[in-house]
Amino acid sequence: MNYPKHLSSFLGFILLTIFSYFSSPASLNAQGEQQVIIFSGLLVQGDSAYGVPNAHIYIPKVGRGTISDAWGSFRMPVLAGDTIEISSVGYRTKRLIIPPNIKNKSYSILINLEEEAVYLPEVIVFPYATPEEFKEAVLAVELPEDQSEILRKNLNSNKIRAMASTLPMSGNMSHRHFMNQQISAIANKNSATSIPLLNPFAWYKFIQSLKKKKKKKKAAADN
């Protein structure tokens, strides 16, 4: 199609302006190009200096992330304006946003994670498979009419003695037994073992007893 000369010049000017706009750096940033930033930090437990290991640092928008090391530190590439989600078992999930107008190529931060107490519901364990079996077992129990009979059985001396003989030593008794063994070992450490054959006093008594027996036999023979 043939256009008038002035119209062709006008169209050429518009095309040149559009091309110059989209090829400029400002237009490239406006089209969505973002700066890659190295995001690093340290996860600590509340106000303490203890790091939180194995915590998840996650970017939900792109579906990638990393895990903190044994000291709670981490390092990962992000984009300016990304939303970061930090979670760990026993702590409240925390979210933060990378500053969109950041000029540096690295961004470091100290992150405090708050502890979260989780209370589990009460669990009652019964030795029966179903509630119906439990009800039948309760209804089948025959309780004694006389409460004094129960007290007599529970306070039976033979039963209490048998129970006491099977009980293990308490912590106080175990400590006392150990200390008595230590005291006996220290007292007998430097004492010599008594052997009658090497004891001169024992030999003296033995010889004296033989002499007395010999004198008695001689006196009996003279009489």
Image (spheres, rainbow, N blue to C red):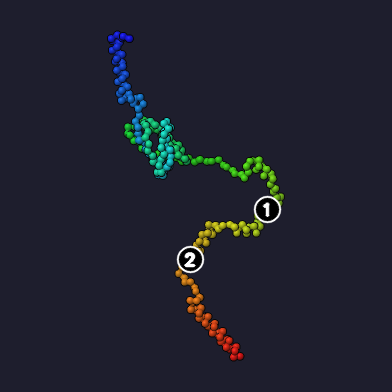
Task: Please identify the quadrant where the N terminus is shown.
Answer: top left
For residue 41, side relative to residue 200 (left or right): left
Which quarter of the figure has residue 220?
Answer: bottom right
Which quarter of the figure has residue 50?
Answer: top left
Count every numbered label the image shows and give the total.
2
* Residues packed near mark 2 inside 10 Å, few (<14), some (14 to 19) or many (20 plus): few
Q: Which residue is mark 2?
A: 185
Q: Amino acid at mark 1?
A: Ile
Residue drawn at x 48%, y 63% is: 182
Q: Which residue is mark 1?
A: 150
- Residue 112, placed above or below residue 222: above
Instruction: Say which label, 2 or 1, has the lower sequence index.
Output: 1
- Residue 131, placed above or below residue 163: above
Question: Element type at marker 2?
Answer: helix
Question: Element type at marker 1?
Answer: helix
Task: Please identify the quadrant where the C terminus is shown.
Answer: bottom right
Q: Position of residue 12 (x, y in %)?
A: 29, 14
Q: Tell me, for residue 8, which label it has, or none.
A: none
Q: Position of residue 134 (x, y in %)?
A: 65, 43
Residue drawn at x 35%, y 34% is: 37
On the question of residue 149 being in view, the answer is: yes
The foreground one among 7 and 123 is: 7
Residue that extends furthest to the front in the rendered view of this protein: 1
Q: Amino acid at mark 2?
A: Ala
On the question of residue 109 being in view, the answer is: no
The foreground one among 78 and 113 is: 78
Q: Position of residue 222 (x, y in %)?
A: 59, 91
- Residue 101, placed above or below residue 210: above
